[in-house]
Image (tube, rainbow, N blue to C red):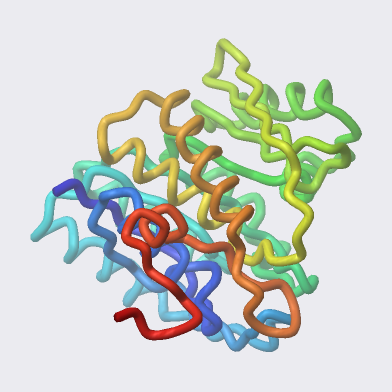
Amino acid sequence: MRVALTIAGSDSCGGAGIQADLKTFQALGVFGMSAVTAVTVQNTRKVYAVQEMTPQVVHDQIVRLFEDIAIQAVKIGMVASVALIEAIAAALEGVDRPPVVLDPVMISKSGYPLLNQDARQALVARLFPLAEVVTPNRHEVEALLGEPIADEAGMRDAARRLSDLGAPKVVVKGGHMSGEEATDIVFDGRDYHRLTHPRVATRNTHGTGCTFSAAIAAGLARGCTFFDAVRKAKAYVSGAIAHALPIGKGHGPTHHFYDLYARAGVRTDRCDD
C-alpha cells in the first residue's frame, strides 16, 4: 500500500488539519501518517487558541518515520512559526524526499491567524524550494504577493509569480473568488490548465483546502501525474463539499467518505441492520 505523510496542525473538531488529511488519504486508498505541528482549540465557529509543538519534536517525528517507512508523498499544512518551518525544512532536506504538497495555511475561516507575519518570508525561502506543488487560495496568494487578485487573469499571473519564487508547480484555488463556478488555475511552470466545477451552495466548507491538498498528495503517492492528481483531487473535494455534513453551529465539515458510504449503503442517521 502507498503511504503519505501529513505535517500539519490538529483540528479538535475533526474537519480540517491532520484529521481531514488522514481521512482523505484513507478515502483515496493511501495509508496516512502524521507529524503534528500544533494543537488547536476550535469548533465549527472559530479557532480560539493554538499551542505549537516544539521544533525538535516536529523534526524528530518526520525523521523517525522516514527511517522506518517508505513514504511516497508528503503534505505540509499549518506551520505557524519560523522555528517550525526551519525544523521541517531541515528534516526533509535530510531524507530521501518524495513529492511534497505545500498548502500555505495562513488564516482560519473565522479570521484567526495561523501563520505568524514574520514566518511568511521563511515559508517561501525554506519550503517553496522543497515542494513539488504549492496550493494557495485567493487570500493566501494576496498575502504572499502583496497584491489583490480580481479575476482569472490575475490568478494566472499569480501562479507564474509564485512559481518564480521557487515552487515548481502551483494551483491557485478559486473557491474564494466570485461566480457560479469554482475555478482553479493549475500551472506546471510551462502550461496552464483550468479546472472548474459548479459552486455548491453550502456553508459547510470547513477543511476544504486541507482536503484538496491532501487529495493531491494521495494522487502523487499513487503515481498519478501532476495534472491528473489535481484533476482527481478537484473531483473528490467537489463531491465532499456537495455531501457536506451539517455538524455544529458554524461551518460544518465536508464528507470525506461520501463515495464509500454510498457504495456500502452506510446510513448516518441510524444503526444499520
* Residue at 69% in and 81% down: 47
Quadrant housing residue 190: top right
Q: Examine the rendered structure and indicate whether residue 163 appears above or below residue 65.
A: above
Nearer to the camera, 61 or 82: 61
Q: Quadrant of the C terminus?
A: bottom left
Whether residue 144 is visible: no
Q: Could you say where residue 183 lies in the image, as x and y percent from the top left?
A: 72, 33
Q: From this viewpoint, which residue is outermost toward the front?
A: 273
Q: Nearer the viewer, residue 21 or 93?
A: 21
- Residue 135 spot, x, y in % from top left: 58, 42
Query: Measuring 65% from the left and 69% from the top, which residue is drawn there?
Result: 114
Left/right of residue 264 with respect to residue 256 in the rendered view: left
Residue 155 sits above or below residue 123 on the image = above
45 left or right of 132 in image: right
Residue at (32% x, 77% y) in the render? 57
Q: Position of residue 158 (x, y in %)?
A: 74, 29
Kindly identify the residue that appears in the image at 42 percent across and 32 percent down: 229
Which residue is situated farthest in the top direction here?
190
Q: Nearer the viewer, residue 177 or 202?
A: 202
254 and 214: which is toward the camera:
254
Percent across and percent down for residue 43 are 64, 84
Q: Is residue 159 above or below residue 89?
A: above
